[in-house]
């Protein structure tokens, strides 16, 4: 009896140890190892191998492997074929850097149940003896006049076809590893990046259709929770429509409010008015449409997502569609037109760069102001009691001369986080803290008020951070876009263009701005009633503060 039990236990052990593995498991592990070797292995990261072709050669062997042992052997043999790696001198002097390692984790070498001990050991050896010279596939260089992160020497594949499984997997493997090693805010994502890979893989190796594959390419980029991050492709217009309504909308209380007109004549033809509250589109309530499409809409936080949701709600292929809306307390149903973008003939009104409001309060529209305007601006507003800087749209490159005027001395306001391309996945604090202002005994003496909302992203948020150095400055409005740092856009593969924030921006004390945005000192959001009454409630609150200091 004891012998039978031992045999049964042995057989059970053998079965469990050699149990079949899934395609998803194999492809996920291959993706991670392919990307790791691309940026770590000295004989790969130097560009001496056709690394895409290496992937295409290994994939059939990966698919053939049916057990963890067989899979590990395929990968070990592959790594061996890449050539010998020289062991580095551990005593070699290394530049001291202050590291930030919330993104960094190579523990998967030893934690993956598909990897043999010898495979894990090989991977660890490669990490310890990684490339130290110039990388062939990636570079990060400041002060070049372009975005510092650059993915180099990637084959374009002019004949890319979505039906080619190898190329679909290549697109995923490239993208996943770009983010794994070079997205500074990976640790802040809602979903674990490893789990995203497992979840999305079936739609790349076995998509149901071209649409399924294309939308997967879009969806995986949205999972970065980064207002800068999305993947653009022509097919999106086929799926969501290439025609627009002639109005601007804001989502408030899960309703779409008309807040502006892109073309007065077209709006009149369609009887669209500012303040109209649209509650249904083609019979669906706005909340339902949002729920269906949130996975395709980029944004670091909820306000950013809602700001970017207009196309998923109103765009379409048909020239007209039905809405249900409320105007003057009455609910009505009607049909309105959509237009191709070039036929919208969007009207841009001239903006007043600055003015003086009642109570000797200056108002500056950052979107309209240019560098050459600064001397006249200072002359006009220097003796005001307060200045309201409207930062609710992207300001031009004007912050430094403005801060030279507003501050009495130089102030620290930001620090940066850069990727270490010689140790991919690790980040370090850029040397020094970024400053603005200068010694200026004739600095501005009045109150400084900054208006902000979700439309302030990236450079707009950076500008607010600099304005916060002014003593007793106040930010009024709502949460900003939460994507601070340079936006790097690049072709992923033919027909697919993607982007994401490529370095980190923090306050001097290392407080984060990504996803959080700039938190206002006084929160004020537009209301439906305020919009219908033609009021700018945020500006009204700023004027009140300028007058009474609270």
Image (cartoon, rainbow, N blue to C red):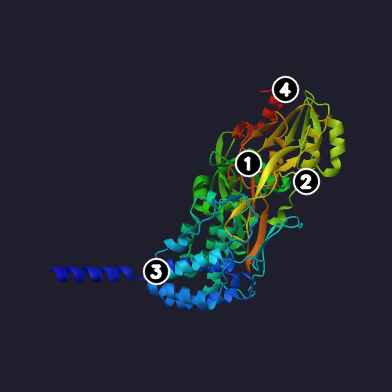
The answer to whether the residues at label 2 and label 4 have Cβ atoms under 8 Å apart is no
Q: Is residue 540 above or below residue 242?
A: above
* Residue that label 3 marks: 22
The reply to whether residue 173 is visible in this rendering is: yes
Q: Is residue 374 above or below residue 101?
A: above
CA gap between label 1 and label 3 equals 43 Å
Q: Is residue 26 left or right of residue 409?
A: left
Precedes in sequence: disc 4 or disc 1: 1
Q: Position of residue 455 (x, y in %)?
A: 66, 43
User: Circle 4: is it few (<14), some (14-19), or many (20+) Cα within 10 Å?
Assistant: some
Q: Nearer the viewer, mark 1 or mark 3?
A: 3
Q: Is residue 217 above or below residue 355?
A: below
* Residue that label 2 marks: 397
Q: Is residue 534 left or right of residue 37?
A: right
The reply to whether residue 391 is visible in this rendering is: no
The answer to whether the residues at label 1 and label 3 have Cβ atoms under 8 Å apart is no
User: Circle 2: is it few (<14), some (14-19), or many (20+) Cα within 10 Å?
Assistant: some
Q: What residue is shown at x 60% (from left), y 34% (from top)?
A: 527
* Residue that label 4 marks: 547
CA gap between label 2 and label 3 equals 52 Å
User: Which quarter of the picture shows residue 157?
Assistant: bottom right
The answer to whether the residues at label 2 and label 3 have Cβ atoms under 8 Å apart is no
């Amino acid at each position: 009896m004891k012998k039978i039990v031992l045999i049964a236990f042995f057989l059970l052990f053998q079965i469990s140890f050699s149990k079949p593995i899934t395609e998803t498991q194999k492809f996920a592990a291959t993706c991670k190892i392919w990307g790791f070797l691309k940026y770590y292995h000295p004989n790969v990261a130097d560009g001496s191998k056709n690394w895409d072709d290496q992937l295409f050669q290994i994939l059939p062997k990966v698919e053939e492997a049916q057990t963890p042992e067989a899979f590990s052997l395929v990968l070990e043999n592959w790594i061996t074929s890449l050539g010998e790696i020289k062991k580095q001198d551990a005593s070699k002097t290394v530049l001291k850097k202050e590291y930030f390692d919330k993104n960094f984790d190579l523990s998967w070498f030893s934690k993956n149940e598909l990897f043999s001990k010898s495979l894990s050991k090989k991977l660890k050896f490669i990490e310890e003896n990684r490339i130290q010279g110039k990388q062939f596939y990636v570079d990060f260089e400041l002060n070049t006049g372009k975005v510092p992160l650059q993915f180099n020497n990637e084959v374009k594949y002019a004949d890319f076809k979505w039906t080619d499984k190898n190329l679909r997997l290549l697109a995923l493997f490239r993208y996943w590893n770009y983010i794994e090693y070079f997205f500074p805010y990976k640790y802040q994502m809602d979903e674990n990046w490893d789990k995203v890979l497992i979840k999305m893989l079936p739609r790349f190796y076995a998509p149901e259709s071209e649409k399924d594959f294309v939308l997967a390419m879009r969806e995986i980029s949205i999972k970065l929770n980064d207002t800068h991050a999305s993947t653009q492709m022509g097919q999106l217009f086929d799926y969501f429509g290439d025609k627009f309504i002639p109005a601007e909308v804001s989502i408030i209380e899960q309703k779409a409010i008309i807040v502006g007109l892109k073309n007065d004549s077209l709006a009149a033809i369609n009887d669209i008015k500012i303040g109209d509250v649209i509650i249904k589109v083609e019979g669906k309530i706005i909340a339902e449409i949002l729920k269906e499409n949130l996975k395709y809409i980029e944004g670091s936080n909820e306000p950013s997502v809602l700001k970017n949701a207009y196309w998923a709600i109103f765009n379409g292929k048909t020239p007209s569609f039905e809405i249900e809306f409320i105007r003057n307390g009455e609910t009505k149903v009607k049909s309105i037109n959509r237009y191709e973008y070039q036929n919208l003939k969007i009207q841009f009104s001239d903006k007043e760069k600055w003015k003086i409001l009642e109570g000797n309060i200056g108002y500056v529209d950052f979107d309209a102001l240019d560098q050459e305007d600064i001397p006249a601006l200072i002359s006009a507003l220097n003796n005001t009691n307060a200045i309201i800087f409207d930062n609710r749209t992207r300001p031009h490159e004007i912050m430094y001369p403005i801060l030279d005027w507003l501050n009495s001395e130089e102030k620290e306001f930001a620090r940066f986080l850069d990727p270490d391309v010689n140790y991919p996945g690790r980040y370090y604090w850029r040397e020094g803290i970024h400053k603005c202002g200068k010694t200026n005994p004739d600095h501005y003496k009045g109150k400084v008020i900054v208006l902000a909302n979700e439309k302030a992203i990236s450079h707009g948020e950076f500008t607010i951070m600099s304005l916060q150095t002014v003593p007793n400055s106040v930010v009024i409005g709502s949460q900003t876009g939460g994507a601070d740092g340079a936006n790097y856009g690049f072709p992923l593969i033919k027909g697919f263009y993607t982007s994401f924030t490529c370095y980190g921006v923090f306050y001097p004390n290392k407080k984060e701005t990504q996803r959080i945005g700039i938190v206002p000192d006084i929160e004020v959001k537009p209301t439906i009633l305020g919009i219908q009454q033609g009021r700018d409630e945020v500006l009204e609150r700023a004027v009140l503060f300028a007058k009474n200091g609270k």
